[in-house]
Image (spheres, helix red, strand yellow):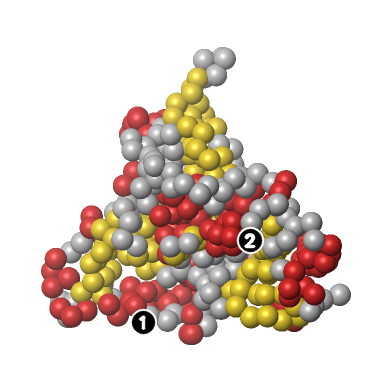
Amino acid sequence: MRLSHSLIPTLKEVPAEAQIASHRLMLRAGLVRQTAAGIYAWLPAGLRVLNNIANIVREEQNAAGAQEVLMPTIQPASLWQESGRYEDYGKEMLRIRDRHERDLLYGPTNEEMITDLYRQSVKSYKELPQIAYHIQWKFRDEVRPRFGVMRGREFLMKDGYSFDIDYASAVISYRRMMLAYMRTFQRLGVKAIPMVADTGPIGGDLSHEFIILAPTGESQVFFDAAFEDVDYSAANFDIREPADLDRFFGVMTDNYAATDEKHDLDAWGKVAEDRRREGRGIEVGHIFYFGTKYSAAMNFAVAGPDGQKIHPEMGSYGIGVSRMVGALIEASHDEAGIIWPDSAAPFKAAILNLKQGDATTDAICEDLYGKLGQSALYDDRAERAGVKFADADLMGHPWQIIIGPRGAAAGLVELKRRATGEREELSLDAALARIGVTAS
Ligand code: 5CA
């Protein structure tokens, strides 16, 4: 993308309405713009990040055996009347009436709709277990939308739903999703701790929130410092193997970790005093097991081995995809701006032409841009070098390739790694090789 002709409106000033770093930086780096309270337009760089996160989520869901579907944002009220949640959900639900006076709503979550889809088609225990998920916009009319995309009214969620024939099998699905989540967060370069959590309007009695520690987080959390050293990834758990999932779940839940609604003073008292950690965290994911709550209420039953009717045991599994953009920035930024993990960055590298219009620098930059293609942002604006440096740091590209007239004459470019600030001068091909592009 050429910065001179792109909708990436960076700001020098700090927007007054933004209270936390990620919100300020998302506005300043031109990732999003607010269009109404808690509702955002995703501009090209922001959308790339959102898509990168969604793709990692998708790959790990698929690897766990979940199947992707896409349910609509608008749902009929009748489904929610069946489960009894139409009244319960209250003012958070955006209710809509169409021209035929039919009641609709903008979905805040999809338990009812997925139960209905399974009810229509799945008739035998032999077809279970199954997990289906989608990545779709949700609307919740939050009383206090704040912190930008962290607590929006419209937000992108990955929500998945499992159907099992009995409790033992449902627990395996739950643990499988927990492992898929830990792998997802690890690929995004953040440490998330699963914590025992409240189930709220989703219901059920087994639930974990995935928390990224950050002073600006909205959740108060308590955990055993042993979590800081837990490395589950070394163990190479096979996500298909129930025995592996059992061991993994043990590693994840042996140490105390709970959000304030579920904080248990007795259990906390048993954690060695020097290991007690208390702080704030951002909830980036939440998983629930709620048994037959929806399958029973909505009369979804399959035929069991002896022909008996069985209401499938269900769980639901959410990741805040758009919230994750803010969470990644909270976890990784400095005075100058965002520091993207390579896996989520909108562009792998920025090409900074320090003397736009100079035949030599222009030629090198065009050559580089041709080789890097869509993975690069070419800063071809007629701006001062200082402006280009500041914007590149602000936008947080993992690499900056800096082309100035002096180096260019000698066939050299400067390569800067955003995370460490390290710079080195090297040939064009060496620079490309360093950032993982083989020169043609
Ligand atoms: N049906 C279940 C799981 S699929 C569910 O809706 N769970 S949830 O309410 O906990 O939401 C899942 C995730 O969505 C949360 O962990 C959070 O990361 C994200 N989320 C929830 N509300 C908002 C919001 N207002 N703005 C941004 N992200 C949100």
Give the percent coordinates (x, y) of residue 417: 59, 74
Horizontal side of 179 relative to 381 (left or right) equals left
Query: Residue 346 appears in which quarter of the rendering?
Result: bottom right
The residue that mark 1 highlights is: 229
Q: Secondary structure at mark 1?
A: helix
Q: Considering only vertical position in the picture, is 189 above or below 6?
A: below
Q: How many other residues sit within 10 Å of disc 1, few (<14), some (14-19) or many (≥20)?
A: few
Any part of residue 369 in sight:
yes
Q: Residue furthest top?
A: 100
Any part of residue 172 in sight:
no
Q: CA distance from mark 2 to mark 1?
A: 43 Å
Q: Considering only vertical position in the picture, is 322 above or below 429?
A: above
Front residue of this view, candidates 385 and 344: 385
Please, what is the three-letter code of the amino acid marked with disc 1? Answer: Asp
Residue at the spot 43% in from the left edge and 44% down from the top edge: 15
Q: Single out the mark in the foreground, 2 or 1.
A: 2
Front residue of this view, candidates 360 and 191: 360
Residue at the spot 43% in from the left edge and 62% down from the top edge: 335
Q: Secondary structure at mark 2?
A: helix
Front residue of this view, candidates 376 and 104: 376
Query: Residue 62 appears in which quarter of the rendering?
Result: bottom right
Horizontal side of 81 relative to 116 (left or right) equals left
Please, what is the three-letter code of the amino acid marked with disc 2? Answer: Ala
Q: Residue furthest right?
A: 440
Image quadrant where one finds the C terminus = bottom right
Q: How many other residues sit within 10 Å of disc 2, few (<14), some (14-19) or many (≥20)?
A: some
In primary-sequence order, the first of circles 2 and 1 is 1
Front residue of this view, candidates 198 and 408: 408
Q: Considering only vertical position in the picture, is 47 above or below 235?
A: above
The residue that mark 2 highlights is: 385
